[in-house]
Image (tube, rainbow, N blue to C red):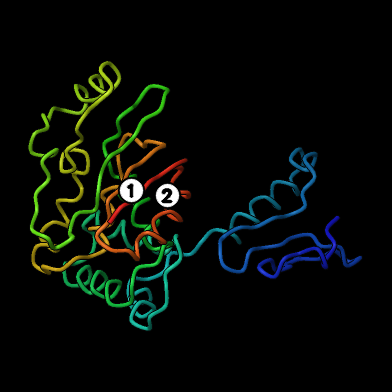
Amino acid sequence: MIAPSSLPQEIEVIAKSENDEIMAIKHKNYPLFGVQFHPELISIEEGMKIIKNFIDIVKPEKASIPSLIEKISSRENLNGIEAKSIASEIIGGTISPTLASSILVGLKVKGESSEEIYGFASSMIEYAIKIKVEDGIVLDNCGTGGDGKNTFNISAISSIDAEPSKMEKAINSIGIGFLFAPIYHPAMKNVAPIRKELGVRTIFNILGPLTNPARPKYQLIGVFSEKLLKLLPEVLIKLGVEKSFYNT
């Protein structure tokens, strides 16, 4: 039994019984639902119908690209699901460079939110070639770049690159490795020409430290803006990072 007075403001009641008992609830901002269902109902036809009906109701509808662009142009933040959806379209190369450019510039002008950064990072991780690291403390030392100081990364140019299987073996045997982003994020080839033509920082300049294919639990991150010192911790928690350190 759920007492209506115990529900937080973010939760909405969407179904009640004839006796006014709460039977189903949902989150107002996220696709999260709860429904009362007795396990023994699975054994009968009506029980399976209830499950099917529930899935049909809660199945999220895919927002159209124009509607998401309209939302961005109105300076409204996308939620994580919307951001991931639109990122997948851009990374997968299924929308035109013109539309992709308008989305990236719109996000930049509005200012990227932590939910939007999380959505883009989640999509990029799904497309990545993964590295399996054995148990233990794994630390990623990576920065966003783009600080405008015209410096170059000594550690990057002194690193030895290798194919994923060999680098995975190196990390697990000697405890260090260099993951060259273009190898582990091949789908980014669809984004590279757009970013080059735009010539300005976009949300993709933030994603490097967030999308390590080895999925480390500890990170040392350099960022180009103090604003990111507030946003990135929120994103990293959602991505499963346990401890992180930052500098600008």
Q: Which of the two residues, 225 or 11, is positioned nearer the viewer here?
A: 225
Judged from this view, the residue extending furthest toward the bottom is 74
Is 51 located above or below residue 113 in the figure?
above
Judged from this view, the residue extending furthest toward the right is 19
Is 178 located above or below residue 193 in the figure?
above
Which image quarter: residue 57? bottom right
- Residue 90 percent across, percent down from the top left: 25, 60
The quadrant of the rendering that contains the C terminus is bottom left
Mark 2 residue element: helix
Give the residue at x 69% y 51%.
49
The quadrant of the rendering that contains the N terminus is bottom right
Give the residue at x 31% y 56%.
88
Q: Name the residue under label 1.
A: 210
- Residue 102 percent across, percent down from the top left: 23, 74
Which image quarter: residue 31? bottom right
Type of residue at label 1? Leu
Position of 201 with respect to 85 (left or right) is: left
| Real-space Cα separation, disc 1 to disc 2, in angstroms | 7 Å
Tag shown at residue 228: none
Mark 1 residue element: helix
Q: Which of the two residues, 165 or 248, is positioned nearer the viewer here?
A: 248
Q: Residues within 10 Å of mark 1 (few under 14, many from 20)?
A: many
Give the residue at x 20% y 28%.
164
- Residue 22 percent across, percent down from the top left: 81, 62
Counting residues from the start of the chain, the first of labels 1 and 2 encountered is 1
Q: How crowded is mark 2: few (under 14 residues within 10 Å), some or many (20 or more)?
A: many
- Residue 113 percent across, percent down from the top left: 40, 67
Q: Mark 2 points at which residue?
A: 236
Give the residue at x 30% y 34%.
130
